[in-house]
Image (cartoon, grey):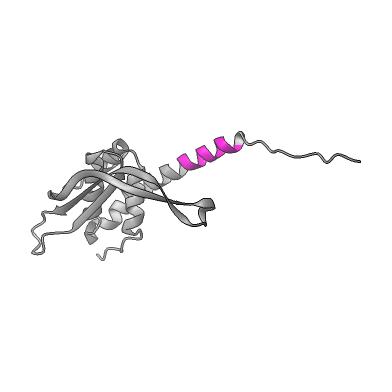
Amino acid sequence: MKQTPSRRTPAERQRVMALTPRERLEARWAALALTADHRCVRGPETGMAMVRGRMGGTGNAFNLGEMTLSRASVALDDGAPDGGPLGHGWVAGRDHRHAELIALVDACAQRPDWAARIDAELIDPLAASLAEGREAASRTAAATRVDFFTLVRGE
């Protein structure tokens, strides 16, 4: 039986996992019951990253400030001659377990026999949950919207 290729890019997976709280990501990962021996190649470690911004979203770029960032890289120990797939994870803050878990999922998603399952059973539900949260926040903000208008005085 031929596996269908993954329909999500690694960057999309990374974004969804980094925005999802670690507890929810761990619960969904445990529900998949995929076991993969792995070793940390780099980190997990915490550092700083410069955040850049643009005035109005389109203007000249400027340095907004620094933020704390944790990263990790893991390799699967699956007996492959090249050392197995290498996965990377980045997350805002100091949560080393979160960064390592993202890297592990990234490495496992590079295996063709697991990629579609990871997308369907892990990433898609997490992305749907994030979308629902954004929609709820948008509805809340819209409910508090105030329209201002100016009356023109006659002469």
* Front residue (pair 109, 10): 10
Q: Residue at x 35, y 58 (%)?
A: 8
Asked which quadrant contains residue 94, the reply is top left
Residue 136 place in picture, x, y as percent: 51, 38
Q: Decide: is 86 above or below 100.
A: below
Q: Is residue 32 visible?
A: no
Question: Along the horizontal axis of the image, is 12 left or right of 141?
Answer: left
Q: Is residue 43 visible?
A: yes
Q: Quadrant of the C terminus?
A: top right
Magenta residues, start to end: 133-142
Residue 16 place in picture, x, y as percent: 36, 48
Q: Quadrant of the N terminus?
A: bottom left
Q: Decide: is 3 above or below 47.
A: below
Q: Residue at x 32, y 60 (%)?
A: 6
Is residue 139 a member of the stretch shown in magenta? yes
Look at the magenta stretch and give its main secondary structure.
helix
